[in-house]
């Protein structure tokens, strides 16, 4: 499933509709953020006896590169990846959000930011999510999908129900605007969750 914005393709070709499919019982949903993960998850998806929907972000095709081993390897479906550990705030994300979060953390060394790349959206790695919450007590869920109906709502609800005692602030979400994706590149930039990432981090840190 090619997905995602950032290429000026408008509302019918730049949607992030991964959350639609996480509602389907028995359907697994994976969403790699790097070439290494893409190969490992694709092999795992092919070998899995269950139906797996494999999301590929179109803008990441053109913007990132990385080493991919020639040897055979699998990345287990349902296992998140700790991109970096921190103590001040957790950013739980996937896909393009991983790169937004990493770049933000690099630009703000004064903050100790914990970044968790979910890699799989169904099933979610609840253990990794809980461990990230334990490390910081402040959680921002970042995704390119629109806010209403996004997977961030499900994750926030689970954290609220199962990790409430670990929180020092409300779980917050940073998502794209609840509008169709604009064709115009400048409007699309404002539509994207990335445009509000700093604002949401500051709100959470200052709570």
Image (cartoon, rainbow, N blue to C red):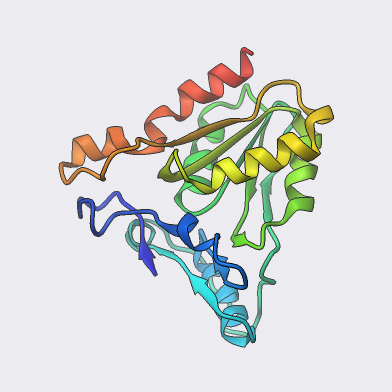
Left/right placement of residue 47 relative to residue 179 reads right
- Most foreground residue, 83 or 32: 32
Instruction: Tell me which residue sits at (54%, 33%) in the image.
Output: 173
- Most foreground residue, 136 or 54: 54
Left/right placement of residue 142 relative to residue 169 reads left
Q: Position of residue 155 (x, y in %)?
A: 64, 44
Number of marks present in the image shown: 0
Q: Position of residue 158 (x, y in %)?
A: 70, 43
Q: Position of residue 148 (x, y in %)?
A: 44, 39
Q: Is residue 96 above or below residue 70?
A: above
Query: Residue pushed farthest left?
Result: 184
Q: Position of residue 57 (x, y in %)?
A: 39, 60
Task: Find residue 188 and report its image quarter.
Answer: top left
Task: Find residue 51 and report its image quarter.
Answer: bottom right
Instruction: Tell me which residue sits at (84%, 28%) in the image.
Output: 165
Q: Is residue 114 above or below residue 73?
A: above
Q: Is residue 41 above or below residue 72?
A: above
- Most foreground residue, 27 or 63: 27
Q: Quadrant of the C terminus?
A: top right
Q: Quadrant of the N terminus?
A: bottom left
Task: Find residue 133 and report its image quarter.
Answer: top right
Instruction: Tell me which residue sits at (75%, 28%) in the image.
Output: 137
């Amino acid at each position: 499933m090619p997905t995602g914005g950032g290429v000026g393709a408008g509302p019918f070709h730049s949607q992030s509709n991964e959350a639609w499919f996480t509602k389907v019982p028995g359907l697994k949903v994976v969403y790699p953020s790097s070439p290494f993960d893409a190969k490992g998850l694709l092999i795992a998806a092919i070998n899995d006896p269950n139906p797996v929907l494999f999301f590929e972000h179109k803008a990441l095709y053109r913007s990132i590169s990385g080493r991919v081993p020639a040897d055979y390897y699998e990345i287990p479906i349902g296992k998140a990846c700790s991109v970096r550990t921190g103590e001040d705030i957790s950013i739980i994300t996937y896909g393009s959000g991983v790169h937004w979060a990493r770049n933000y953390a690099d630009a703000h060394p004064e903050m100790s930011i914990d970044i968790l790349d979910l890699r799989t959206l169904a099933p979610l790695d609840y253990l990794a999510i809980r461990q990230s919450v334990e490390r910081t007590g402040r959680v921002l869920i970042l995704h390119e999908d629109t806010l209403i109906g996004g997977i961030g709502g499900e994750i926030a609800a689970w954290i609220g129900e199962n990790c409430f005692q670990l929180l020092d602030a409300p779980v917050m979400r940073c998502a794209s605007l609840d509008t169709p994706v604009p064709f115009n590149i400048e409007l699309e930039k404002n539509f994207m969750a990335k445009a509000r990432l700093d604002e949401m981090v500051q709100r959470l840190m200052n709570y």
